[in-house]
Image (cartoon, helix red, strand yellow):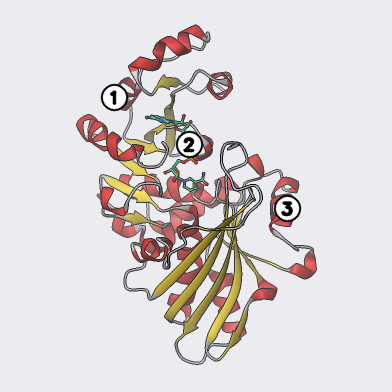
Amino acid sequence: MIRVAVNGYGTIGRRVADAVLKQKDMELEGVTKVRGDYRARLAVEKGLPLYAADGRHVPEFAKAGIETKGTLNDLLKRVDVVVDATPDEIGRGNKPIYERAGVKAIFQGGEEHSLTNFSFVAQCNFEKAAGKNMVRVVSCNTTALCRTLHALNSGLGILKARVVLVRRAADPDETSKGPIDAIVPDPVTVPSHHGPDVQSVIEGLNITTMALKVPETHMHLHSVIASLKGQPTRDRVLDALAKEPRVLLVDANAGFKSTASIIDMAREMNRPRNDVYEAVVWKDSVSVADGEAYFFLAVHQEAIVTPENIDAIRAVSGGIGKEQSMRVTDASLGIA
Ligand code: NAD
């Protein structure tokens, strides 16, 4: 059994914690929280061992009548791997704490690649994570681009990729973020950081990205254009995408008119929290002209990195290979 802690029980941490509970080869030893809020109370009611992220927070939990089992340092003594799901750039400060405790750590995409010098997407580089102590699971956008571009690169070969990312402005519970009535080039300069981030996983890929954000909370939508080697056809591109794990092809003619339909599908499938773990490509959008492939790609930012975190835990722990890990993870989450 791999003993796991989740440090930071927010959007990503809650999903990873629930996914760890579904793995037969993992034990969730505990989660940490900063605040004694309703999420902390619900975690305890679900039976999760709750720890204060820092000793300074203990009185707040006691005041709220929420039982904690100790602090992060106590939790780290009980585990083999910690998943750091704290807000952007907090992980950098936590790294020495994990090193001192002698536990392996999985960080998230809000950290720089340089924090671990290894950025992870299961189908691209699972094996290379073996034996590493620190791994960074890349962001939601980078995960989706890596899955789909990996499909085209290994199936046909990519000469260059150009992507425009339309990003959701905030997660559904983030009421302090905007915009609420504007489209914001973010960043206004080109390229955005997403291209180099993809290159941290798929080395040497010729990719340029530009990004903007819109008043939306549920998903991102990318427009992807990739120049391909040889004689690409629509069928070959579709075949490569269909064969790739964790890529879901949907059809506008079947009612998938927008990202809202994709979230609605997840709701109807009784996916926890309406989670869409797959990178979603509109089959109808896939077209090829003059050696270039075009498609629309939708990304459920809150959910897509959940399976990657589970595979990253196995990858650094050793003993189980890529295909088996991905199969087990996907079966546990209901990914077809
Ligand atoms: P979040 O704000 O929803 O959750 C972070 C949690 O950590 C909160 O509960 C917060 O109270 C807690 N926290 C704050 N400081 C802490 C500390 N010092 N120690 C322990 N816990 C602390 O953030 P999130 O959206 O889950 O993002 C976590 C990481 O995942 C970031 O690196 C982010 O870039 C990345 N990520 C986020 C998304 C997304 O869409 N939300 C997608 C992919 C990757």
Name the disc covering residue 265, or none: 3
Query: What residue do we see at 46% from left, 8% from top?
Result: 62
* Corner quadrant of residue 297: bottom right
Amino acid carrying mark 1 in the image: Lys
Measuring from the top left, give residue 15's x and y in whole percent: 53, 39
26 up-or-down from 322: above or below: above
Mark 1 closeness class: few <14, some 14–19, many ≥20 residues within 10 Å: few
Q: Quadrant of the N terminus?
A: top left
Measuring from the top left, give residue 255's x and y in whole percent: 79, 63
Amino acid carrying mark 2 in the image: Gly
- Queried on whether the Cβ of the residue with tag 2 lies below 8 angstroms from ligand 1, the answer reads yes
- Queried on whether the Cβ of the residue with tag 1 lies below 8 angstroms from ligand 1, the answer reads no
* Corner quadrant of residue 39: top right
Measuring from the top left, give residue 171's x and y in whole percent: 58, 43
Q: Secondary structure at mark 2?
A: helix
Q: Quarter of the picture for ligand 1?
A: top left
CA gap, disc 2 to disc 3? Answer: 23 Å
Name the disc covering residue 305, or none: none
Amino acid carrying mark 3 in the image: Met
CA gap, disc 1 to disc 3? Answer: 41 Å
